[in-house]
Image (tube, rainbow, N blue to C red):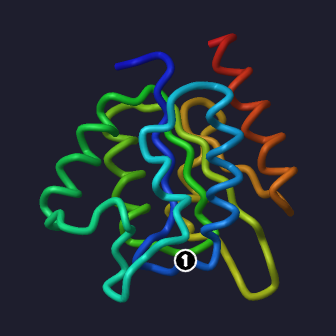
Amino acid sequence: MNENCIYFCGSIRGGRDDAEIYRQLISHLQTYGKVLTEHIGSTEVNEKGIIKEDVGRTDKEIHDRDIEWLEYAKVVVAEVTQPSLGVGYELGRAVAMGKQILCLFRPSPDKRLSAMIEGAKNGDNFRVVHYNNVEDGCLAISSYMKSLCNV
């Protein structure tokens, strides 16, 4: 585990409407360490839902690489507004690995966070923060990362 490595989760095949938000959150996270999954913020996705950086890789190769990165990272930050099976899977694996996890969710009248995510928050190693915009998300990240220094 590397103290300066962060694993960022965001929807890819489940929908890319928030890719620009991911990019901005990742940029902010980079002030705290190496974001192993910075490609999640890419806006270049092909018709099969594959990010440019992963073209030519099999699903198995992507899975195995990402699990290796997840094992290596100290902290997991997930933007969970756009429902995603992959993000849910990554979060489940991160919980099983005992990772520090921050989930960011932008509430709106037509979106409700899964009870499996909202209900998992425990204020200790699994936190969920509702935020309104990128600036609020960055403030939540800063607060979270600073709190880890006191753990």
Viewer-proximal residue among 100 and 35? 35
Q: Position of residue 35 (x, y in %)?
A: 50, 37
Residue annotated with mark 1: 16
Relative to 81, residue 104 above or below: above
Residue most extreme to the top: 150
Give the mark count. 1
Left or right of 63? Residue 128 is right
Q: Position of residue 100 (x, y in %)?
A: 51, 31
Mark 1 closeness class: few <14, some 14–19, many ≥20 residues within 10 Å:
many
Identify which residue is drawn at 21% across, 56% down.
63
Label 1 is placed on what type of residue?
Arg
Left or right of 15? Residue 62 is left
Viewer-proximal residue among 76 and 28? 28
Relative to 13, residue 119 above or below: above
Viewer-proximal residue among 14 and 48? 48
Q: What is the secondary structure assignment of the residue under circle 1?
A: loop
Q: Quadrant of residue 105?
A: bottom right
Identify which residue is drawn at 64% across, 69% down.
81
Viewer-proximal residue among 52 and 136? 52
Identify which residue is drawn at 29% across, 62% down.
54
Query: Which quadrant of the figure contains the C terminus?
Result: top right
Identify which residue is drawn at 74% across, 21% down.
146
Query: Which quadrant of the figure contains the N terminus?
Result: top left
Left or right of 118? Residue 86 is left
Relative to 131, residue 58 above or below: below
Q: Position of residue 86 (x, y in %)?
A: 36, 66
Q: Position of residue 5 (x, y in %)?
A: 46, 27
